[in-house]
Structures are given as structure tokens and as C-alpha cells.
Image (cartoon, rainbow, N blue to C red):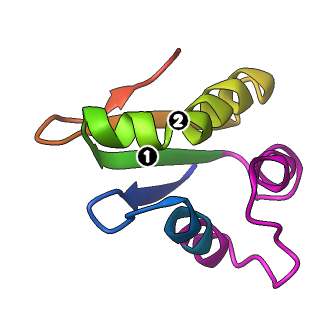
Amino acid sequence: MGKIEFDFNQISDLPAFYQQFAAQFALGEGFGANLDALWDVVTGDIELPVEIEFANLNARRKRRFGAIILLFEEAEEELEGNLRFNIRETGNSAQHHRG
């Protein structure tokens, strides 16, 4: 299982997240950079199995990126073990995250 980490010390807003996501998964110019496009890619286009970790999330960042966190939690359920989603809060070790 491959592992992809998104460091939220380096991601300031939603456009920056979508840009890093597209770069990590080598998505072309056609990636829509919105929740619907993200769902479609995560549940149907990326190579599975994969572990995705969100690192350095504090309470403010969790609120800012809440919709994306929820999307990955739902995708983890739907993909039944082919996607693992973890959140590592600022200063903490990684924890498997299940809503």
C-alpha cells in the first residue's frame, strides 16, 4: 500500500490543497479542483490501495478543510479497506481516523 502525505503547514487554502492533490496523483489539467471532482478521482481514478495522511492539522485547519476531511472519511468507508485515511494533528503521532 502506497502512502501519500499532505502537510497542512504547507497548504494554506483549498486551491493549494487541490493543487498538491493533483500533483501527488499526477492528474492532468482536466481535474476540476472541487469536491465532486475530488470524489470522482478518489473513488475511481487513483491507484488503490493507498494510505492518505493529513499531517499538521490543528483545530482551525480542521474547520477550514472540514468538507475535504469528511469526503476522505466517506471514501474510506466506500472503498472498504482500499483507502486508509489518517489525520496527524500538530505535535501528535498519526492516528487512523474514522468519523
Residue at left 61%, top 27%? 73
Q: Is residue 17 left or right of residue 56?
A: right
Amino acid bearing label 1: Glu
Q: Which residue is mark 1?
A: 53
Residue displayed at 78% across by 30% down = 79
Q: Report which residue position mark 2 lands on.
A: 85
Labelled pair 2, 1 in contact (Cβ < 8 Å): yes
- State the residue at coordinates (71%, 21%): 77
Corner quadrant of residue 57: top left
Examine the rendered structure and indicate whether residue 70 appears above or below residue 44.
above
Task: Report the side of 59 relative to 48 (left or right).
Answer: left
- Give the crowd class for mark 2: few <14, some 14-19, many >=20 residues within 10 Å: many
Q: Quadrant of residue 64?
A: top left
Q: Nearer the viewer, residue 25 or 82?
A: 25
Q: Is residue 36 visible?
A: yes
Compared with 58, 29 (above or below) is below
Residue visible at 82% across and 71% down in the picture: 31
In the visual, does 65 lie left or right of 79? left
> Which residue sits furthest left?
91
Q: Position of residue 62 (x, y in %)?
A: 38, 35
Q: Which residues are magenta?
A: 20-49
Tell me the amino acid under the disc marked 2. Phe
Query: Visible in this render: residue 81?
Result: no
- Neighbourhood count class around disc 1 (C-alpha, 10 Å): few under 14, some 14–19, many 20 upward: many
| Residue 34 covered by magenta stretch | yes
